[in-house]
Amino acid sequence: MMDALPGILGGLVLLALGGELLVRGAVRVAERLGVSPLLIGLTLLGFGTSTPELVTSLQASLAGSPGIAVGNIVGSNIANILLILGLAAMVAPVAVASRALARDGVIGLLAALALTGAGFAAQLGRPVGGAFLLGLLLYLLLSWRQERQEGASHGAAYAKSEAFEGAHPHGLRGAVPQAAGLALPLSLALGGLVLVVLGGRLLVDGAVALARVLAIPEAVIGLTIVAIGTSMPELVTSLVAAFRRQGEVAFGNLLGSNIYNVLGIGGATALIAPTPVPAEILALDIWVMLGASLLLLLVARTGWRVGRREGVLLFAGYLGYLWAVWPG
């Protein structure tokens, strides 16, 4: 136990720090190269803030730990809806834009259905990974077109980047002076990438060791400890948005994260390191993810808001899920 916990905690710290540096450096490089703020928000910020989940699932798959790889994706989506949205709604009622829900909420549910179907049909192999990444590309193109329309309501992909920027008092540029050329932000991004890779390795090794010490399936660790740990950026950004009464940003941030988790992280992991979906995840957790995705649509549709009472119910649902997953 004492050997596993330092690895898990150290890995989470490196993932958070490395992801922060990677995003800041990459955004500054893109700005220097003349990339538009909208494109930066939809791509670099969307992918950058999901880097901890991506690296963790990819390294777990390469290490032969599908329970952690797939559990991280499924568990993060469950935590985003039941835990993080529940807490955000308990802080302040979360407003929901009808257009964003109709597009992003449905796409999130379809992505969850696609992951479920792929899991039961076969392993997450390269054809599935390619299809998922193509789906993400099409989603980003749709978001790009709609975001450019004057007066259009922001979608989940944009809200994900807006929530990240809002959680940083000085924006994304505070760590990189305006006068700096490409060398400093590029070094920042590369250094962040190195930290993320090291953090992912520490986290996966620690999670595997903890599962062996406790004599429980790796999937349990992946679905809970790893998933919650890699979802900390979403927790922080959504709570900050809720405290600022920016409910639509908090809601869109979580929807965007769920879409990126399945299509982006699931797709990249399947394409690079094909992995099976463990039987224990297919038996329970993937259905919880599907149910939570559907519940999200139903709850958000009632009054176009997620109120405090609904937040308490979502949070209680997550506690019930943890009770069902953890043995003993």
Image (cartoon, rainbow, N blue to C red):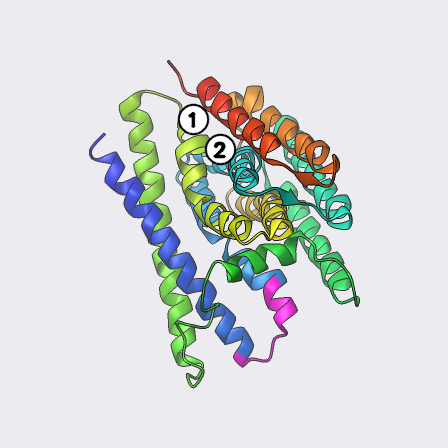
* Label 2 packing within 10 angstroms: few (<14), some (14-19), many (20+): many
**Residue at 43% of width from left, 63% of height from top?**
22
**Residue at 77% of width from left, 44% of height from top?**
102
Q: Quadrant of residue 122?
A: top right
Q: Magenta includes 40?
A: yes
* Image coordinates for residue 140, horizontal then vertical, percent: 69, 57
Q: Earlier in the sequence, mark 2 or mark 1?
A: 2
Marks 2 and 1 close (CB-CB < 8 Å) = yes
Quadrant location of the C terminus in the rendered image: top left
- Reading the image, the residue beneath label 2 is 71
Badge 1 element: helix
- Reading the image, the residue beneath label 1 is 220
* Image coordinates for residue 239, horizontal then vertical, percent: 50, 47
**Residue at 36% of width from left, 21% of height from top?**
216
Alpha carbons under labels 2 and 1: distance apart: 7 Å
Quadrant location of the N terminus in the rendered image: top left
- Where 190 falls versus 4 (above or below)? below
Q: Main secondary structure of the magenta part?
A: helix
